[in-house]
Image (tube, helix red, strand yellow):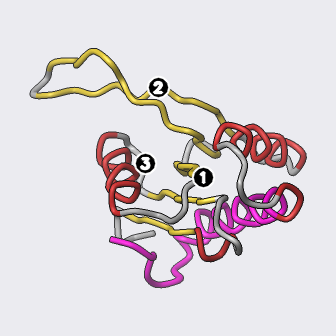
Amino acid sequence: MTEGAGKSRGTEPINALTHAVIGAAIEVHQVLGPGLLESLYERALCHELTLRGIPHERQVSLPVRYKGELIEGSFRLDLVVASTLIVEIKAADRILPIHEAQLLSYLKLSTLHVGLLINFHAIRIKDGLKRFVLNPRF
């Protein structure tokens, strides 16, 4: 599911958080522009989040369990913001279905319900941004 529905009081904190992260991403994109490496945008976004006082973790390990068994070779989430929001960063010509599937898989495998897919290669950051919600309460 993409795009959260409704504006109940329970969704205000996550909506404010996603808004703040998008604002930070816009700032990074305005300063650096498109066409650089994904890893550079990740570090710049982390720096911008720090400047704004937004707690986050970078390259967070996501273990995978299959039928109760821990599978070797966990995933790495680009960013987890405020222990609530997954941010997947891309620097690609366009967002592809596989990028969307990747973030949706991360949401399913984690305990988190909201994710942002940000493609810094877009000419306008709003054209490279998608919000995903697995739980309709957000």
The stretch drawn in magenta includes residue 19: yes
Q: Residue at x 47, y 84 (%)?
A: 6
Residue type at the position of mark 3: Leu
Residue tagged 2: 61
Residue tagged 3: 112
Q: Which mark is residue 14?
A: none
* Among the two numbered marks 2 and 3 on one chain, the one whose residue lies closer to the N terminus: 2
Q: Secondary structure at mark 1?
A: loop
Magenta portion: prevailing SS class? helix
Q: Secondary structure at mark 3?
A: loop
Location of the N terminus (image quadrant):
bottom left
The stretch drawn in magenta includes residue 3: yes
Q: Residue at x 70, y 59 (%)?
A: 21
* Among the two numbered marks 3 and 1 on one chain, the one whose residue lies closer to the N terminus: 1
Residue 113 vertical position relative to residue 63 in the rendered view, above or below: below
Q: Closer to the camera: disc 2 or disc 3?
A: 2
Q: Secondary structure at mark 2?
A: strand
Cα separation, mark 1 vs mark 2, equals 21 Å
Residue type at the position of mark 2: Ser
Q: Residues within 10 Å of mark 3 (few under 14, many from 20)?
A: some
Q: Quick one: 90 or 52, which is closer to the camera?
A: 90
Residue type at the position of mark 1: Ala
Location of the C terminus (image quadrant):
bottom left
Residue 94 vertical position relative to residue 62 in the rendered view, above or below: below
Residue tagged 1: 91
- Measured as percent of width and height from the top left, residue 47 is found at 83, 41
| Residue 104, quarter of the rendered image | bottom left
Which stretch did the figure color magenta?
1-29
Q: Closer to the camera: disc 3 or disc 1?
A: 1
Q: Closer to the camera: disc 1 or disc 2?
A: 1
- Measured as percent of width and height from the top left, residue 92 is found at 55, 56
